[in-house]
Image (spheres, rainbow, N blue to C red):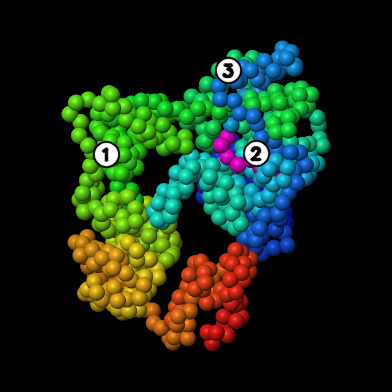
Amino acid sequence: MDAKKEIEKLREEIEYHNRLYYVNDAPVISDYDYDMLMVRLIKLEKEHPELVTPTSPTQRVGGKALSQFTPVHHLVPLESLSDVFSFDELKAFGERMDQALGSDRQFCVEPKIDGLSMSLEYENGYFVRGATRGDGITGEDVTENLRTVRSLPMHLADAPAHLIVRGEVYMSKAVFNELNAEREINGEALLANPRNAAAGSIRQLDPKVAASRKLDIVCFNMQYTDGEPYKTHSETLDAMKHMGFPIVPYKLCCTIGECCERIEQIGQERGDFAYDIDGAVIKINSLSQREALGSTAKFPRWAVAYKYPPEKKESRVVDIVVQVGRTGVLTPKAVIEPIRLAGTTVSNATLHNQDNIDRLDIRIGDTVLVQKAGEIIPEVLSVNKDKRPDGTVPYKMPEFCPACGAPVVRDVDGVALRCTSPECPAQRLRNLAHFASREAMDIEGLGISVCQALISSGLVGSPAELYSLDAQSIAQLDRMGEKSAENLINAIEKSKSAGLARLLCAFGIRQVGQKAAKTLAVHFGTLDKLMQASQDELKNVPDIGAITADFLIEWFSLPQSQHQIKLLREAGVSFESTDTVKDTRFAGKTFVLTGELSGYKRDEAAAIIESYGGKTSSSVSKKTTYVLAGENAGSKLKKATDLGITVINEEQFREMIK
């Protein structure tokens, strides 16, 4: 078989399995077999770049980053809907439909997905453009990001020459929880809710970021077709499903009473949907009747969106327990008598922190009002003090970690209480993932999933134990083989010589990130000298203040820290600095790096600058000396120009470091 035919066959087969997996939820091959098909296609396309097409499954991983989104004028406006908040308002809508259409009409009821509305355009069955709703008339071209959505078909079966459909991009609740768990481990700010996460992902200028967010889509309207005419909305949905689109579940109803029953049913089942919903949509099914009804200046007359009111219910606090998060933060949680909220049974509610407990005066035994915040996290809103039983006492957070018994401290700049132990079992995954991360010991192949597998199997309990692993034990883990295990062992061995700066960053000491770690490594030279330093000696190090000095002394004094250092020393991990200043040509100068550099990775360029006594910063200010700009430089370049800061390219940078 020649390359072109094999590539076409592989693409067809992969898209078939994509549809079974992402749309029908009925895969027929293993993940490994799917991966092997993709590996073969990637290899063939690499050997024959002239055969690569925009609709190839390989392009779903994200292409080159964009500098901006271009505007798209919608051929058919993407209208919003008028909201109703009660069945009385819905019945009034039904009466208007009766007056205009008589009794010969049918309603279509669908869940209202809480996502980001999109226009999807196809020519001759191929996806050519996708745009955000914008103001309904003009949106933004996000085609490259939409290519990364696996459930969106790139090629349709039996499609007309020109087709535009409307869909809702969303992040599933499972992916949202997984993403936030990763962000917590990495010390990043948590995303507020799946809708915001989806909106932020689809508007990333770098499609690779969008691809990593595992977005999905559900289609709910045929905007335009030059093919066979349809009589009803339900016919268009069925046709879209046949073409390969994931469609919104719908039910036809003859009366408003039936619509109300369906809305109540959707409300009871909302916890079972993969996506968040914020209501139900009620539409006239006949397309000719829709055309006759038309639209107002703002909304179509033939549809409304029923919005579910936020549910609030009372329950009794049975207990207050404290959970230790993956970053060591202690979070109090009320254990309540089970209640039904927003389609799910709730038996726990977050209390956030001690300040919130004090503000509401929440006690064990209290009757409290509970609501789902953003339809996701149950929280306590208030206490019904009229129902408070005798003998209750104010609740105080523990002074020692409930997971390991180590002392807890309050964050200097916040209200969180945090466990101080580097060996806390609740923090194992976060500590291990951070230790292996790129900015720390840079152990290639040791991502979060492998860290989780090592911990779950009992092979590793702390970062220092990585150095006692053997390839045979690793090879027994799920999705690991002999070659992967061997590569991981080699990467772990290589990390022994990473140097003091990376090791200090890997420890996860508060306020000791990459820059502070490098400063300390250059100043003291060895870990032993750093550990012997007094607070005054630490405070005299440039950019190391009194608070950071206290954190360093506190961390090194912990028995758990000393145990980790002992194990690392025995394993042969280098405690010496590899960072030296070649000369001071960049002393007192601050660089900001922006755009895509062709000759250096960002951290490589930063290391070179620091080796000549300079500093790097992530933001442009009046203190910035130079901005090193690569391709597709964005707002930082503009700000530098506005402030009159010297902008240099890579060639000029090379001249400066000769």
Tell me, for residue 88, which label it has, or none: 3
Q: Residue lying at the far top in this picture: please name it.
A: 103
Label 3 crowd bin: few (<14), some (14–19), many (20+), radius 10 Å: few
Considering the numbered disc 1 on the image, is that residue within a helix, a strand or a loop? strand
At horizontal 62% and vertical 71% (from top left) the residue drawn is: 641
Q: Is residue 93 magenta?
A: no
How many discs mark residues in the rendered view? 3
Q: Is residue 387 left or right of residue 247?
A: left
Q: Which residue is mark 1?
A: 321
In the rendered image, residue 133, in percent from the top left (x then y), is placed at 67, 43
Q: CA distance from mark 2 to mark 3?
A: 29 Å
Tell me where residue 298 sits by quadrant.
top right
For badge 2, the amino acid type reads: Gly
Q: Which residue is mark 2?
A: 167
* Sequence-first disc among 1 and 3: 3
In the rendered image, residue 515, in percent from the top left (x then y), is placed at 40, 70
**Pointers 1 and 2 in contact (C-beta within 8 Å):** no
For badge 1, the amino acid type reads: Val
Q: CA distance from mark 1 to mark 2?
A: 42 Å
**Pointers 2 and 3 in contact (C-beta within 8 Å):** no
Residue in the foreground of this view, choosing between 635 and 461: 635
Q: Which residues are magenta?
A: 113-120
